[in-house]
Image (cartoon, grey):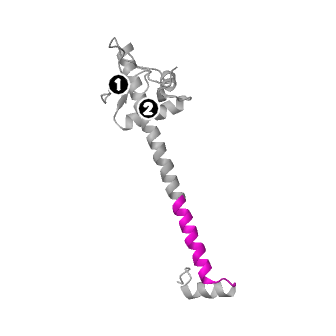
Amino acid sequence: MKSRIPSEAAIQAEMEQCGIDRLPAIRRLQQRAFLLTRQREARRADLDAALKASAKRQQAALRFITGYLQAKGYSPSFEEIGAAVGLLSKHSVQRLLNELEDSGAIRRIMGKRRAIEVVEHVKLPRAPDGAPLYFVPVGGAPC
């Protein structure tokens, strides 16, 4: 069976036939490799920033759930969690809770509403009277 990968000599012959000088072609390949490397680095930086934002949001949600449980004795609803951490859809809250559950920070009972148990200990900010501040706005912005 004949190999489909052309040899160096075949590539050189085809380049000469088409009037392509080898040096500019190599430069173009090097430039393309450089651009691809830069794009990869930019995507990696974007991904790192997204992961950091996700981790902050997870911590905010965990802090909110912990404080809510301490203040009211039962778990917050998806709408309340979304409002606390700045998520607009229930699906986003579901995904956030799935990430927290996968990391082992919370435990949920499927099929039950408001059934979230915090497994990981979280320090909560306290009011001057010692009550937990369970609503901590994202970014520290006042509500």
Count the numbered circles shown.
2
Where is residue 87? Give x, y as percent: 53, 30
The secondary element bearing badge 2 is classed as helix
Location of mark 1 (residue): 117
- Which residue range is magenta in the image? 18-38
Three-letter code for the amino acid on which mark 1 is drawn: Glu
Instruction: Looking at the picture, tell me which residue is in the foreground, 55 or 81.
Output: 55
Q: Assess whether residue 107 is covered by the magenta stretch.
A: no
Instruction: Looking at the picture, tell me which residue is in the foreground, 94 or 113.
Output: 94
Location of mark 2 (residue): 97
Residue at the far right: name it: 18
Instruction: Looking at the picture, tell me which residue is in the foreground, 70 or 129.
Output: 129
Q: Is residue 16 above or below residue 34?
A: below
Q: Residue at x 34, y 32 (%)?
A: 105
Q: Residue at x 44, y 25 (%)?
A: 111
Where is residue 28? Give x, y as percent: 60, 73
Where is residue 56? Give x, y as percent: 43, 35
Estimate how packed mark 2 is, as few (under 14), some (14 to 19) or many (20 or more) residues with alpha carbons within 10 Å: many
Where is residue 130? Give x, y as percent: 32, 14
The secondary element bearing badge 1 is classed as strand
Q: Residue at x 53, y 32 (%)?
A: 91
Compute the Cα span from label 2 to label 1.
11 Å
Q: Is residue 8 above or below residue 115?
A: below
* Lateral position of residue 105 relative to residue 51, left or right: left
Prevailing SS of the magenta stretch:
helix
Three-letter code for the amino acid on which mark 2 is drawn: Leu
